[in-house]
Image (spheres, coloured by chain):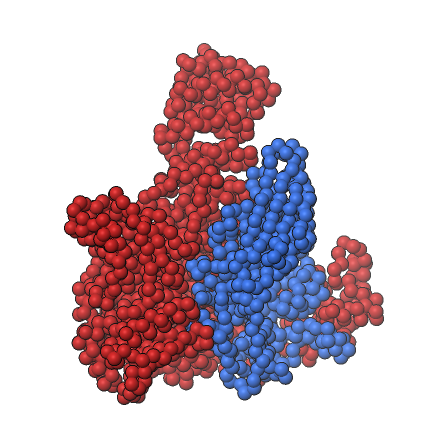
Chain colours: A blue, B red
Amino acid sequence: MIHSLFLVNASGDIFLEKHWKSVVSRSVCDYFFEAQERATEPENVPPVISTPHHYLISVLRHRIYFVAVIQSEVPPLFVIEFLHRVVDTFQDYFGVCTEAAIKDNVVVVYELLEEMLDNGFPLATESNILKELIKPPTILRTMVNTITGSTNVGEQLPTGQLSVVPWRRTGVKYTNNEAYFDVVEEIDAIIDKSGSTITAEIQGVIDACVKLTGMPDLTLSFMNPRLLDDVSFHPCVRFKRWEAERILSFIPPDGNFRLLSYHVSSQNLVAIPVYVKHNITFREGSSQGRFDLTLGPKQTMGKAVEAVLVSSQLPRGVLNANLNPSQGTYTFDPVTKLLTWDVGKINPQKLPSLKGTMSLQAGASKPDENPTINIQLKIQQMAISGLKVNRLDMYGEKYKPFKGIKYMTKAGKFQVRT
Amino acid sequence: MSASSAFNDEKGGSSSVGEPEYGHDPASGGIFSSDYKRHDDLKEMLDSNKDALKLEAMKRIVAMIARGKNASDLFPAVVKNVACKNIEVKKLVYVYLVRYAEEQQDLALLSISTFQRGLKDPNQLIRASALRVLSSIRVTIIVPIMMLAIKEAASDMSPYVRKTAAHAIPKLYSLDPEQKDQLIEVIEKLLADKTTLVAGSVVMAFEEVCPERIDLIHKNYRKLCNLLIDVEEWGQVVIINMLTRYARTQFLNPNINESLLEEGGGGDKTFYCSDEDEDEDEEKEKQAEVSALAKRKPYVMDPDHRLLLRNTKPLLQSRNAAVVMAVAQLYFHLAPKAEVGVIAKALVRLLRSHSEVQFVVLQNVATMTIKRRGMFEPYLKSFYIRSTDPTQIKILKLEVLTNLANETNISTILREFQTYIKSMDKDFVAATIQAIGRCATNIGEVRDTCLNGLVQLLSNRDELVVAESVVVIKKLLQMQPEKHSDIIKHMAKLTDNIQVPMARASILWLIGEYCEHVPKIAPDVLRKMAKSFTNEEDIVKLQIINLAAKLYLTNSKQTKLLTQYVLNLAKYDQNYDIRDRARFIRQLIVPTEKSGALSKYAKKLFLALKPAPVLESPFKDRDHFQLGSLSHLLNAKAGGYQELPDWPESAPDPSVRNVEVKESVPEWTKCSSREKRKEKKVEKPFYSDSEGESGPTESADSEPDTGSGSESVSVSVESGSPSDSEESEESSESDEDEEEEEKEKKKKKKEIKQMQASESEQSSEDDRKRDRKIKEQKSNSESESDEDSESESSQSESSDTESEVEVKKKKKVSEPKPPSKPLKKEKKEMSLLDLDDFEPTPSPQVTPVNTFLSNSLVTDLEGLSLSDSVLSPATIAPSSALKNYELLHRITGEGLSVEYCFSRQAFSPDANMVAVQMHFTNNATSDTKNLHIEDVKLQSGMRVKEFAEIELLPAGEATTAVMGVDFCDSTQAANFQLCTHTRKFFVSIQPPVGELMRPVFLTENEFKKEQSQLMGMNEISENLTLDAKCRNEHAIVQRVTTAANLSRVPCGSDKECSPAAPPPPPPHPHPVYRFAGKTVTSGSLVLATVATKDEGAAQLTVNCEKMVIGTMLVKDLLLALTQ
């Protein structure tokens, strides 16, 4: 399936290549570079490119293109999903997935790729199995290795692949047994210029960090599972139990993993945590434009709205912006025309505002579009959909684990049209 | 930080080489000179007997390989270390070997013996890894060795080694295709393997080596289906894709005759049904009969076909986008039309993923929306475009939106397009304009609106926008130019204002092309243009010449002089193109003695009919490629693509999939096979193992236990026939598996269930029913026959409605959309660009409000309802139970009196609304006309669906109408004006809290479980003394159900228990009555419990997530029970 993999950095250099079948010359990437040149934005490079003898399927993550070379029919999503899994694994191993990190750990990267694909077909993609095979580099281990000459490669051969729960390694031991779950919800919304919601939905995930000894069997139940409109699970979750009882029952992988992601559709009205009062005008004939933005909390269930960040792509005609924020700081990049305003926390008593003028190119006609405003925010200790975890039980092991649940709401793709 | 860099730092000190491998530009010098020396150094390190040095050397070599540097000259030095004890060194040597063996075949042979030794190792993992590397060495000489190794590994004890063998097959095949026959034998053997570990890999090998040998799959088909859920995700994708092709060759098209289609469930039943029924038994034994049936009967789905659909469905919830997509394409290609809908939600979910995933999914959705638009219509808003989307995603979303556009949603979509037109991304704007053009061609009603909007766009400042709109307008006009001479006229007028040259040129072309439709204006335009000719841009000048030529040919009388003038001006133009054109045209159109034969054909040249362009989706007919495939994405056949075969005319013999007797009866048909299978298995699949009761393979098994549903051969699952739903009531647990086939249907079915449940509680005067209940409690051991009689009785009971339901069914099948969807009447004339005067849509509803059917029809269909979820009114709610409220008194209403009651039926146009039945009586002496509702005043969030206007209510007559109110689970009144042709009356409807819910059927266990989750704040209990008249079961149940629209939870006989469960305990001296319902709008559960105690004392408990509702309900129920 996957023939070769090339990693290309933002400036168009191939800095790593790996072949699983016979070697494909790196000149095949020229087709990719051509497409890259044609695309105006980095993310506009088509994910699938057809060349005379090969097909190139690429993903862009962390400003690195992962270009897979394919020779024959294969579901494109199969490759894309795999490439993303590779990136996730790198991130898991090195903390970040940057060119420097990959170059520094090139041997580990190579070992990983070797294990993840066999003859182009995915072999071991579960991080638990991989970590048994190849230990992630840590400062301590690096030190020890340097001194003793031991290696990153696990002495033990992996057992996970042979068990019925391939995602969990055997013989896990912890002195502190703990299981943490983070319920993180993101609001995706489009608000139109009059302030009414065009579309709004909630996308949520439950990320888990489970450090439990042995083979625990966990069940997680919700107060209101009916909220969850559409769910997708980590393979460890038993489908049938969910279908029948709306209870999550699973043997968790060891460490960090995403237990499930869910969707709360718009039919249950989605609470919009902030409102934006805006007045952005350009006058015909004048080289000045007015910019006036006020934020305020809307439906926040009494929780504070924090880490608010407003960004807006101003029209090309804008030369500079001379604004005055009532709190926080703003920056305007005259090249990309990107205005960002780091608001911080919204104080309901004193609403943050950003007011001022924009200077336009002299003689240029008034831009006919108004910029959209993107908002990022965070609300701690609340899941905006109202989802509540009822209880977490553990079976199969004797000890009493420490359990914790955290809720958080964020803005996802939250846009206000003006 | 990391291992390797640290190594380098350390080494950098001792060896003079430093770290040339990392981050150095090859052109930066030094490398070429040090090349030889460095390799020397590496060789030395490899030859040393210290593992650490070897490792260091190997790491550097691997780093070289990673950067694409040639390290082949180190081969001899490296290959020596293949037998090294250090695992990491060994692994890195393997990496090197696999990379360079092809180039150094002779030397590579040195390593073979090491692997051969490894193949015999007692440790399975070493065997596997030896086979893996051995098969990866692409050296032709070792083909026989590889073949032998694969064959041996294929019968290895360890499934992991067998998996590796499966992986090795395509490697060997690509090395030497002549081994195909032998390899197929191995594949056949591995296909029969029963472990999930092997399944994915061997199917992958099958796909690469012999995808045409579909016959190999027969025997393994059912096993693959059943194992699917436990296979690792990548294997799932491959298996599902393969099974899609397989199913296309082996089963009949489920949509073959849609009118008679009672699909799916029927076939299901025939296969999994009870043993007691002879017919079924026969069918189970001889599956050949099924195909015979298929010929005789309209269509019966092959049970194996159903098995595939059922077992893939849960995978829609996989986290892996590729798996979801694979299931989606399987459903799209194989499922009956009615069931395909389930995939939409999952695909929409993928739109949240990475942009590459979005890209692929949107491509597939675009293709799907052409065939099955209805599927994605509810998710219209998910395709709205954000300014931050990459352009390619925007354009695909636009494509989907355009495909989804129809008469009902076009106004919303166009409004959305208005926003897009103003985007900064000009490619996207151009695409939007084209999309508008396509909407206009597809939907006649909005063509004029779109055209008007596009015409206004002509005055846009951006040339691209203008050019694109002109092109689209041109296309639209070309379709029916005669109708739009006024637009051409309008465009002619625009020439005075529009300055964008491209637009001017396009307009001139249009006028020239259709000069016959605007005979008066065209010459005048030419006159104006001639005047300004010298000041025009070049492209405009060229079009002026064109226009002049065309006019000269059609209307030479008026324009002869003008043409000559223009041509003269052009003759002396600065631009040589224009001079050339003028010269050329003059020769062509002005007849002179010298002019050649061509001038005769001038008219044909210039006025040839230009074909109207076709505006259709680029995704049309793409579905002949298997969705989700690379070929589909590229719209071109990729190498190795396996054509998706057409459905066969008649189904091939299904018995080929039967497995030999040796295996006993095929597992999936035998109810008690669970244990056996476990024993047989080397490994227990995760889900089925831990599931016990409801594993995937068992889903069907519990069916025969219940032993009902015998008549369902002809009655499909989703027909919603009483027998079916009754059955599901009996075996709700096992049915859940069944029901997940179609969620929508499930809902409907549930509603029926609720209805019936409530019915059985409410109409307690029905003696027969009560008898039955007693019988049921008495004889649980006879439950089978009992259940039968039950389903029969309920069937006879509602037989009158059944026929109606069936009529409904047919109607439904014949038209996929909701039946009551006449065209939206008040199609607002909206201007495309006029942003300021549209009102924002008040509610996030996608589809505009359905207009009601005519009044009489509403009352006729009332009981039936459009969602076929409601039985006829007579059976649902005994009229005695309904309390009438006065809306308008006879005196204040000047003769018109109106009463209303809550009919407790689902309000079909909108399930979130409470149906209010209004009874109008005209006591006056004159007729009342035009009864309708106006000026609705509501609390925020509330909605009202008015009844259709009653045109005439003659004196002394009475009529009824039904309206829907969404009270948002509050008891706030809905205020509105009731208008007649003469008067307006202010009225209001305030619902008692008990009407804001609808009954839900729960078993006692479910009830208790739900109750346990609604403790604390959500629980309210009160002690009370029951009214003297209200101390028996009948009275309590009746009073509670009258006060609130709840259904009784059956007590005592726990329906979930299997027949073998202990008989119910003798009636408790203090019975507990439980009632369940959920609120209409939000669907929150409402649970009520009345626990009786001695001497009329009782405790009332209400559990509800909505505390306000709970409190109010407690008050109401207290009142009802104590008075």
Total residue callouts: 0
Q: Residue B359: percent from the left, percent from the top?
A: 51, 54
Residue extending farthest to the front is B891
Quadrant showing the C terminus of chain B: bottom left
Residue B51 visible in the picture: no
Please name the residue shown 62% across and 82% down the image. Answer: A176
* Residue B974 vertical placement versus A141 (above, below): above
Q: Horizontal placement of B32 versus B882: left or right?
A: right
Q: Is residue B397 left or right of residue A408?
A: left
Residue A277 pos. (x, y %): 56, 49
The residue lying at 28 percent from left, 52 percent from top is: B947
In this view, A303 is above or below B825? below
Seen from the viewer's position, the closer of residues A352 and B466 is A352
Q: Which of the two residues, A321 or B358, is positioned nearer the viewer here?
A: A321
> Can residue A206 be seen in the rendering of this structure?
yes
B988 w.r.t. B568: above or below: below
Residue B775 screen position, x and y as percent: 21, 82
Vertical side of B285 occupied by B615: above or below? above
Q: Looking at this view, is B436 or B239 the one in front?
A: B436
Residue at 45 percent of width and 18 percent of height = B524
Q: What residue is shown at x 43% (from left), y 34% (from top)?
A: B452
Q: Position of residue A125 (x, y in %)?
A: 56, 70
Q: Residue lying farthest top?
A: B593
**Picture quarter with the N terminus of chain B:** bottom right
Occupied quadrant, residue B827 = top left
In the image: residue B769, left or right of residue B336: left
